[in-house]
Amino acid sequence: MALYVSSACFCGFSQKRVEKIRAVASEGFATLKTEEEKVKLGGSDLKVTKIGIGAWSWGDTSYWNNFEWDDRKLKAAKGAFNASLDVGINWFDTAEVYGSTLSLGAINSETLLGRFIKERKERDPEVEVAVATKFAALPWRFGRQSVITALKESLCRLGLSSVDLYQLHWPGLWGNEGYIDGLGDAVEMGLVKAVGVSNYSEKRLREAYEKLKKRGIPLASNQVNYSLIYRLPEENGVKATCDELGVTLIAYSPIAQGALTGKYTPDNPPTGPRGRIYTPEFLTKLQPLLNRIMETGQNYDKTPTQVVLNWLICQENVVPIPGAKNEEQAKEFAGALGWRLTDDEINELRSLASETKPVIGFPVEKL
């Protein structure tokens, strides 16, 4: 697991004494039987819970949080972090560009996650936290050393000596071979336990896999947009290739940024940039699927959120990472584990979802 060192940035990353964790359940909420609910990421030795927590919204003012970050939202994010650990979900996905300081009032997500880990360990030294973060393939970054330099900067913000999973956030316009070399170097330097990519096409995925394989390093994961209403990974060969190569598919936006939770309606669409994607017209067409998701959940005493997360897990070799803004959401996510939809229910939901026109994805998926 990630090793905590300090909140200050310095070279060398001297390792402090590290203690393993035990997640303790809050009274009234069941804790996952963690080992039973863990899976290996690809061919790596890294084991994570079948659901992780996305930290994209933490500190962000460019897409989430109605363009502002304040103490109330900070408290809520910290509550999400602690509640996740309390119910047995102990890995968190962030990135160097989440909460970019280029956005007015933003706080870097890595910085917040590092602070939360430090504060939790002060009162619970044995707590076990797995951290995944990402390298941004910015046009001015060249070669393998750019990956190592960015990783060390991320470790400084996180206050860690290593991370469990380091990913290339998207394919670069150029220099991708150097970036893959940098991932391999990071493993050999002991700065990461496993490496992955994100938003990689079938072709790029195979290239990255083969290049790392030559060094005896497994490609652990490919993180892509995947949900019941966005199934491009099934259509473009990415899901099949992940299955073939033994690369875990990590699903971001697995609840379609809240559109599949039943929270939003044509009369109550999401605010901010999401409102331009999940419009009243789109939500009107989505209602038959949402109604069936709700009815299916009633059979198991589960919420729509838990149903759609379970649907993804049932696709096999998929680990969803829904974003948690608060304690209640984090606790709800844990309820997607420990049960399974029937094959008929899985197929029925897929059939209904196919009648909904897919939402916009991330443009770099097609690079």
Image: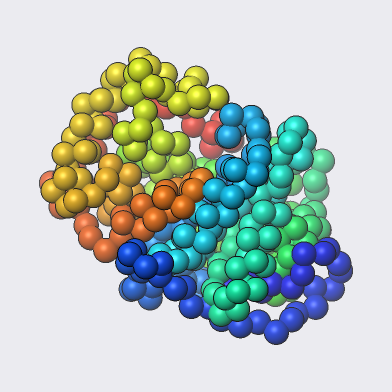
In depth, the one of 222 and 49 nearer the eye is: 49
Give above or below for 276 relative to 74: above
Find residue 89 and report its image quarter. bottom left
Figure quadrant of the C terminus: top right
Residue 362: horizontal and vertical position, in percent?
A: 54, 33
Position of 118 with respect to 32 (left or right) is right
In depth, the one of 44 and 261 nearer the eye is: 261
Give above or below for 313 relative to 72: below
Which residue: 28% across, 42% down? 304
In depth, the one of 100 and 27 nearer the eye is: 27
Find residue 181 and report its image quarter. bottom right
Residue 12: horizontal and vertical position, in percent?
A: 84, 73
Numbered label tally: 0
Q: Furthest-right residue in view?
A: 11
Position of 25 with respect to 180 (left or right) is left
Residue 182: horizontal and vertical position, in percent?
A: 72, 60
Which residue: 79% across, 57% down? 153
Residue 137: horizontal and vertical position, in percent?
A: 71, 44
Q: In the rendered view, how is the structure colored?
A: rainbow
- The reply to whether residue 137 is in sight is no
- The reply to whether residue 334 is in sight is yes
Position of 261 with respect to 90 (left or right) is left
Which residue: 67% across, 54% down? 112
Figure quadrant of the N terminus: bottom right
Give above or below for 288 relative to 183: above
Which residue: 22% across, 38% down? 293
Q: Furthest-top residue in view?
A: 281
